[in-house]
Amino acid sequence: MKALSGKLSLGAGRPSGLWLMLLLLLAALVPSVCLLWFMNQAVQNERLAVRQRLVEAYRVSLSVMQNQLEAHWRQTGAALDAEAEHLSAPALFARQVRAGLADAVICFDAAGNVVYPSPVSAPQPDPLEAPWAEAEPLESASPVEAAAAFARLAGRATNVNLAARAFQAQARCLVKAGQTNEAIAVLTGPLDEDRYRHATDAQGRLLVPNAELMALELLKATAPDRARAHLERLKTRLLDYDDPALSAPQRRFLMHEVQRLFPDQTFSPMLAAEDLAARFLEAGPVHAGEPTLHPTALPGVWQFASTRGRVVTLHQTEALLGRMRDGIATQLMPADVSLAVLPPGKEFEQSLLTLLAGATLPQWRLALSLKDQGLFDTAAKQRIASYVWIGVVVFATVIVLAALALRLVRRQTALTQLRNDLVANVTHELKTPLASMRLLVDTLLNSQPLHEQTAREYLQLIAQENLRLSRLIDNFLTFSRMERNKYAFGFKEVPATAIVEGAITAVRERFNAPGCQFETHIAPELPSVVADADALVTAVVNLLDNAYKYSGEEKQITLSASAENGSVCFAVKDNGIGLSPRDTKRIFKRFFQVDQRLSRSGGGCGLGLSIVKFIVTAHHGNVRVESQPGRGSTFTISLPRAEAHPEAEGKLSSNTD
Amino acid sequence: MTAKKILIVEDNPALLRGLKDNFQAQGYQVRTANDGEKGLDALLRDPPDLLLLDLMLPKVNGYEICRLARSRRLNTPIIMLSAKTQEEDVVRGLELGADDYVTKPFGIRELMARAKLCSRRASVHALPGDWHLHQELKP
């Protein structure tokens, strides 16, 4: 309880200080948290913004490509019509397929009927002559006789078609009779003549290629060397699309047969095109329709009609994508993105931007994707880094400012505390002399009769108390002016001895008491100083007061004045309690007292030394202390002599006259 | 009846002199001390009938003297003299065991009256069966 009540009086000013610190902490913390939040937002926005900027930049390129693709297909449509004008249907087919422009082609005539690859060939109903009826029944019974009969028919025939058919039948019968070589001779001999070139059978099929296939089959078994030559001839014939006589089904049949006989032979890409076209025609009725790319009944196959509908090109999806890529001038595309053409229904997850491909490609889309998916990050990173740096700098600034403010506040709080203590001290210091004076005066007034000796002693005590009170008030006033920077010094050139004498006069009466040994050492021929004499005397008296106050029963106080290296020194030496090295650094601060308990005895409030320091500093001098705890202290004021004083010329000249 | 003994501990010589003369004039047997150390020493060596104690003393302050005296079961009446007029200072002094608290500057007649009251109370306390009186005196 006792300790608590003691603390209560001290703690009165604390809570507000605590609140202030809390407030400051909050003032630093809240902006920092906000800043972090803003930075986070900015960083997130930056990613979006970078993406947005990229999208905007590429949208233009993508629409250019869209236009190109659109133009490409329109040109394709027009070009197909133009080619249809001056090329035969098979030639057009071959050209488109060989050039890789289409996987297959369907050509129409003006009426909209399929011209190539026509599903059927035109039949050739040539009238059979009478002996055919005799020869045909013999074929299965007696192939040799049948062969002879067909040979005779061939010799007599007036019609090229019939002659050729007779030769073919003769060869067939010879094969049946086992006379392979004779059959080969017929097939490669008479039938090879040029006049049979366009001979057809009853179904309108060309005879010669079929005969060649037969010969090839026979030769393969008997004379492979000769077979090769025939094979080349047949291939040339099959791949010759300029000859309109060969119908598409027959061509396809022969190609397949040749491939069956000679698996190493291929008809790429024509056979695949013929197959695709055939499948397409089988799948359903065909019409050209709009000049747009649309799906067919065959899965994975697209059809595209020419502008006027004369030609329909067929495309497999994979090949189509390649053709579209070729149609776009890729050099116009930015280097860091790749373009994809997406068929309907296909999604592309990493696309940065998609766009409908245009009118000729309904539901197709164009998609741009970044080659480097980290592009956003690298672009955003620099900005983010700058944000982070700014954030760090602001954060650090806030922290530093808060720390500074906190320090200032704490210092201010401490100072306020000291000032409060001062007020208490001042009250005490003023009241003690008042109390003793009142007591003595009351006693004098009450005593009947007045004893003269006692009265004199009382009056002396009252005078001393009065003097002390005056000095105290002087010090407070000086301090008050000093605090408000209102102290006006009146500098004059004064002999140093005058200062010393002034100080001795002020303390002589007190220091002459028993138990106090006061000495003065004044060097001869002291120079003069530029000073406010009253202020300087106050400073020296303050030092003497301190010496008196902090010395014990047997006081030995020495005041000396000397000249040293162009300055004048006033030193006060005592044999008092002394100062620790730590205290010597602090004693010139306001309100500091080495021992609070001592303050009462000498009438100090911790102001004396700070006043000394203030006065001496104003005189361009300095004050220092040398001390040993328990042994005493020496305080020395040193001032520049008059001729070295900075204000000696300017201010003095106007003041001294 | 023997003269009452009073010990005055005060470091201001003028105040000390005035107090001493006044109490002597009233028939007290006066001893003085001008710092806390001497005051405590005098108090413990020969406990007086009344202690007049300044608070702001060199070496050992008045609060400390009061606390030490009470902790040694010394029930000498104590009157504190102080320039501190704040309520908490007064309360602190009384809680430490002072019987009265007089603030500076004071009238000497008032102080004399309080001193008389304190010593009278102390003599009543000393009687056996003072418990009733103690109760009556409580507010």
Image: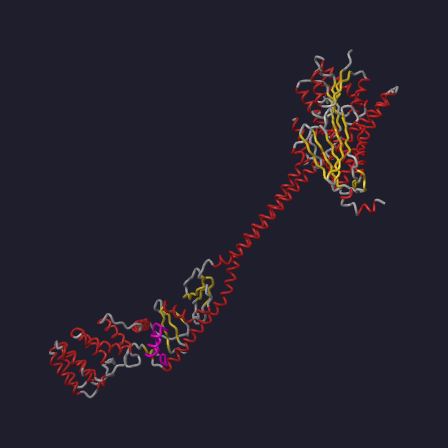
Question: Could you tell me which quadrant the C terminus of chain A lies in?
Answer: top right
Residue A90: x %, y % from top left: 32, 79
Looking at the image, residue A293 sits to the left or right of residue A37; the answer is left
**Magenta-tinted stretch:** A90-112
The answer to whether A183 is drawn above or below residue B110 in the figure is: below
B47 in the magenta segment: no
Furthest toward the right, the residue is A449
Residue A477 versus residue A492: which sits nearer the camera?
A492
- Residue at image location 43% in from the left, 67% down from the top: A363
Residue A477 in sight here = no
- Residue at image location 73% in from the left, 16% down from the top: B48
Looking at the image, residue A126 sits to the left or right of residue A341; the answer is left
The answer to whether A246 is drawn above or below residue A602 in the figure is: below
Residue B57: x %, y % from top left: 72, 26
Residue A56 versus residue A505: which sits nearer the camera?
A505
A104 in the magenta segment: yes
Q: What is the image's colouring? A: secondary structure
In the picture, residue A22 is in which quadrant?
top right
